[in-house]
Amino acid sequence: MKNIICGIKEEKEIELLKEAGCNIIMLADDHHATRFPAYFDREKLRELIVKCHDANLKVMIGVNRIYQDEEIASLREYMRSLKKQDVDGYYFSDPAVYILAQELGVVDKLVYNPDTLCANSYDINVWLSKGIFGCVIAKELTLAQMEEIAAKTHDSMIMLHGYLNMSYSKRQLLKNYMVEINEDIDLDHCFDLRLQEATRDDLMPVYEDEQGTCIYTPYIQESFNEFLSLGAKGIDHFIIERMFLPFDLVFDAIVGYRKIEQGMDATTIKKAYEEKYAEYPLSSGYMYQKTSMVK
C-alpha cells in the first residue's frame, strides 16, 4: 500500500483521515513551518503527535521555513524535543535543518522539499546519498519527467492533489498592501483571499503567515489517472496539499485514490469526483504541459 500524507486543520480530522486511507499526518507548530493549513502551539502539538501514534498513524513535522542565524538555537531545541517524541519525519527545505539533524542523529527521517529545485535525478540522488529519507520531486514537471526521475531514484515523493504553490516571498505582501489601500483586514489564518491578474480571469488563492506570503495555482491538481503509473515507477509517498481545501473534498480524494489502488477504474473514480465537485477548478496541472506553456 502506498503512503498518503495529509495535513489537518483540527484534531477531529485525524481519525477521519485514517478512515479515508491516509496513513501519515503532517503537523506544524506556529513558528517553524510555513504554508500549512493550521499551526499548533507546542503543548497541542505534543498531544496531536501522541494521538496520531496511538491511532497507528505516522507523523511528519514541518520545519520548512528558511532560518536566520539567530534562529538556529531555537530550531535545535525544537528538533530535540521532537526527537524525544519519536517523530517519524521532518519536512524541510533549508540545509540548516540537515546540519542539525546530523547533530541529533535523525538524518534518516528528513524529507527534502525545496519546491522547484528537485527537478532532476542527479540532485535527488545527491541528497539521498547523504542519508535522508526522501525528496519531493518538483511539482512543476510533467508526468513523463516525474516518471523518468522516479525510475532513476528511490524514495521520491510527489504532490498528488491540491492547489500548488506558485510563488513564495518572505515579505509581508498582503499586510503592506492593506496598509497601502487603508483596509483593516485580519490576515491571521485567513484562507479566503484571492488574487486576479489584469490579463486573466482565474482567481489565485493567496495566504500570508509569520514566514511570508504565498500564491497558489487557480486550479486544484488531481492525479487519479496518473496515480498507478507514478506508483509503478517506484514512488511510494504521495502528498495531499491541504491548503484552501474543504475537508470533504480531501476525504473523498483520498478514498478515491485508495479505491484505484484496490483495482477500481481510475477514469470512473475521476469522473465521479469531478461531478461531485463540479464547482471547484480541478485540473491535471502540469502533468501534460510544461510550465512554459501555462504561465
Image (tube, rainbow, N blue to C red):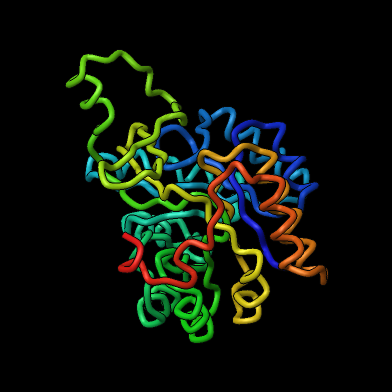
The mark tally for this picture is 0
Q: Is residue 199 left or right of residue 37?
A: left
* In the rendered image, the vertical position of residue 4 relative to residue 293, given as above or below: above
Figure quadrant of the C terminus:
bottom left
Foreground: 136 or 273? 273
- Name the residue located 32 percent from the left edge and 41 percent from the top edge: 73
Location of residue 234 with respect to 276 vertically, above or below: below
> Is 287 positioned to the left or the right of 295 in the image?
right
Residue 116 rendering spot, x and y as whole percentages: 35, 63
Q: Residue at x 42, y 80 (%)?
A: 125
Where is residue 19? Give x, y as percent: 80, 47
Image location (x, y in percent) of residue 203: 40, 40
Question: Is 63 displayed left or right of 60 in the figure?
Answer: left
Q: Is residue 22 visible?
A: no
Q: Quadrant of the N terminus?
A: bottom right
Residue at 65 percent of width and 36 percent of height: 48
* Farthest left residue in view: 180
Residue 183 point in image, percent of width and height: 27, 15
- Placement of 185 over or under 90, stated as above or below: above
Check the image and report above or below for 130 versus 193.
below
Q: At 49% from the left edge and 82% from the top edge, which residue is drawn? A: 153
